[in-house]
Image (cartoon, rainbow, N blue to C red):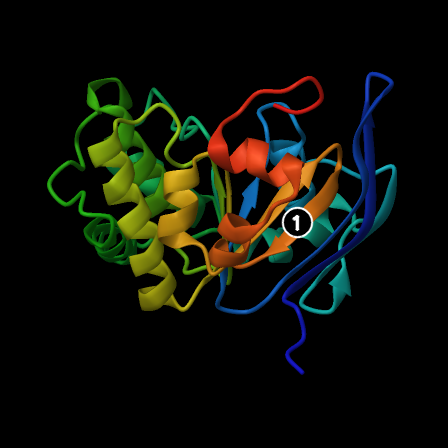
Amino acid sequence: MIEPLIHVQNLVQRIGGQEILRGLNLDLFPGETLVLLGKSGGGKSVFLRHLIGLMRPVSGSIVFEGSEITTLKERELEPIRRKIGMLFQDGALFDSMNVFDNVAFPLRERGEHDPAVVREKVARSLAMVNMTGHEHKMPVNLSGGMRKRVALARAIISPPDVILYDEPTAGLDPIVSDSINRLIRRLQSQLRVTSLVVTHDMVSCNRVADRVALLHEGRIHFLGTTQQLRDAQDPIIRDFVDGRSGETVY
């Protein structure tokens, strides 16, 4: 039996007295793309931040490659973070740096100062996301889709074991969204990377997911394939998949 790369058990988080995560359980297996669906403000991004140690749970366990990470100190988390690439919802580029320096930032932070090595790795990362030739542009001069591609190049500059995507198609038109979806699948194949994609975009889900989880009221309400999701008759699932509002959901 394949061991999960990330094993999350009974994760609980409260913010301002509100319980956001209420005993969340989820496994992420090597090489797969798992899509985490859920309504806006339902705790999906909060969950991602736990996986890279930016938030500590009230209780529960997160095991990454066999090691419990919820109890690690900041310095002890650094080797874990090197294995995890994160694409934040807004890209989180440094507005004062051009594309080249944004992508090179993680290398330099980790002590790589050889200009030839930095140039080679930045060029390779930008090529993988189809952004070659934009090295000297500033973030303000990039479209939304281009900003996300640059942020993704930065996330893969040191090939990670896992890439976490926080709403990768949010705010993008359908054509640009499709290009991002194709990029997610291509990187999974090229880098043999494990991906967790947080979204409420059903089109994106159907394009990239190997498995799908639905987060509802702080717990995983559904876990299965996209076909099983489409076939499900559970009213909570149907309301989400069909985009219907109701008294108690979405």
The residue drawn where x is 22% and y is 24% is 143
Q: Which residue sits furthest front?
A: 233
Place of residue 51 in the rendered image (x, y in percent of width and height, measured from the top left) = 66, 47
Q: Quadrant of residue 40?
A: top right
Q: Is residue 82 left or right of residue 157?
A: right
Residue situated in front as seen by the camera: 94 or 173:
173
Q: Residues within 10 Å of mark 1 (few under 14, many from 20)?
A: some
Observer able to see residue 225: yes
Numbered-mark total: 1
The residue drawn where x is 55% and y is 69% is 30
Observer able to see residue 195: no
Residue situated in front as seen by the camera: 200 or 115:
200
Please say if 175 is above or below 160. above
The residue drawn where x is 40% and y is 49% is 206
Quadrant, the C terminus: top right
Q: Is residue 239 left or right of residue 8?
A: left
Q: Quadrant of residue 218?
A: top right
Q: What amino acid is labelled 1 in the image? A: Phe
Place of residue 1 in the rendered image (x, y in percent of width and height, measured from the top left) = 67, 83
Q: Is residue 216 left or right of residue 93?
A: right
The residue drawn where x is 43% and y is 35% is 201
Q: Quadrant of residue 187?
A: bottom left
Q: Which residue sits furthest bottom?
A: 1
Q: Is residue 51 left or right of residue 117?
A: right
**Which residue lies under the disc numbered 1?**
222
SS for dot 1? strand
Place of residue 71 in the rendered image (x, y in percent of width and height, measured from the top left) = 83, 50
Place of residue 97 in the rendered image (x, y in percent of width and height, measured from the top left) = 31, 26
Q: Which residue sits furthest left?
A: 133
Residue situated in front as seen by the camera: 119 or 173:
173
